[in-house]
Image: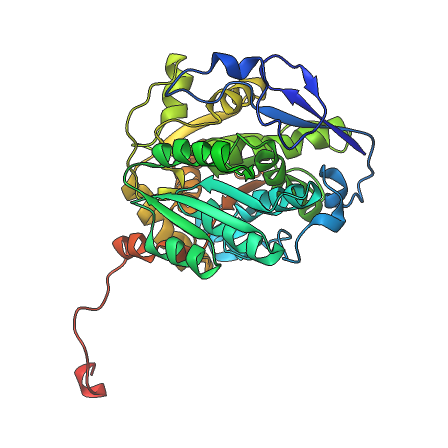
Amino acid sequence: MEFTYSCSLCSKTFQIDPQLTLCPACSKSQVKDQPLNGVLDVVLHGTASKAFDILDLLPVEAKYFPPAPVGNTPLWEPSKLRAKTGFQRLFIKDDGANPTSSFKDRASYLVSAFAKKFAIQGIALASTGNAGSSMAGIGAAAGQSITLFLPEAAPTAKLVQALQYGARVYRVRGSYDLAYEISLQFSQQKGGMTRNTAYNPMTIEGKKTVSLELFKQLGQAPDVVFVAVGDGCILSGVYKGFSDLLQLGLITSMPKIIGVQADNSNALCRALATGRFDAAPACTVADSICVDVPRNGFHALAQIKRYNGSLMTVSDQEIILAQAKLSASSGLFTEPAGAAAFAGFLKAAPELDEQTSIVILATGNGLKDSEAAKRGIQVPATLISSIDDIL
């Protein structure tokens, strides 16, 4: 298998090079407070059988990947939840089972291998929390130096996790978007590799592995996939995996991808309706999808239109209630962003055919933000000292 880059805007092709992050021509027209222009797609050239090895469909040789068990996450078949909802072909992809308890390990895994292949030791990025702790953990396994820029609102658990892995962490007085800009300036001045979402083509390419795994686990592509959306990078990764399978002739149609955003962090939904992106401040309990300007916005929106996908929003209250319902009805405790995808399913369920095969992407473990989860439960207010206090 061989690989090249292709610009998602002008379709110009390039050889893969670690110094090339965006299309040189299209990125010149970048406008402040707008999504990235010239996001690069990895294009594969070759053939594969249904028994393909996932690593063979990635643009870095297997020998460069760190010794961390990324991917091959469980596909839950929640019988109680199926009975309650009537959807007997409902599945939950549990990416909280990755090494750092996050879907973001898929991107970090490939970025780490890419850096190692080109003898790059330092990797920097901005993150709301998950991508940062993910890159810190995978980088620790690879022996790489990781520098993180986290907004002040990043959950404590994710900050502690990144520091435990030995990353150098800078807390930014402001939003994720400011952290993103500072991290790019850092990389430009200090060198190394930038792992920032969409800016590094390997982030989307690494995330495509979830679609490849779903194909292998189900023996076919699902009919519908619900995925929480912030920057739009995971959404594009899901599309990329299935489009590779289409190109290889292993599936015949693209699944219906439904992106779910929080009401107060819904830039992609607004852009789909109005045709333009505006930088309205975002605020949601689902920190992983809290983004003012979706960096992969143009790219993700183009894929939604091309493949007849759709976008929807859910409230923070719906997210919190969905998180508790998913935990109590299946035993899977996911973070608010993963619960947003489930909330989207619950909201859309009346319009869906109960016979369809549906996958909900649960993107991280709920313990990554236990403070948010407390909003959906009642913590006992009193202490007992004997069994008599209960009886």
Residue closest to the far front: 189
Name the spot of residue 49 as percent of width and height, x first: 83, 38
> Would you say 372 lies left or right of 382 here?
right
Occupied quadrant, residue 50: top right
Name the spot of residue 242 as percent of width and height, x first: 65, 32
Name the spot of residue 146 as percent of width and height, x first: 51, 49
Q: Is residue 343 above or below residue 40?
A: below
**Residue located 55% across and 45% down the image:** 122
Q: How many marks?
A: 0
Residue 131 in sight? yes
Occupied quadrant, residue 179: top left
* Closest to the observer, 247 or 35: 35
| Figure quadrant of the C terminus | bottom left
**Residue located 17% across and 68% down the image:** 381
* Closest to the observer, 80 or 38: 38
Q: Is residue 137 above or below residue 16?
A: below
Occupied quadrant, residue 202: top right
Name the spot of residue 121 as percent of width and height, x first: 60, 47
> Would you say 326 lies left or right of 264 here?
right
* Closest to the observer, 105 or 309: 105
| Figure quadrant of the N terminus | top right
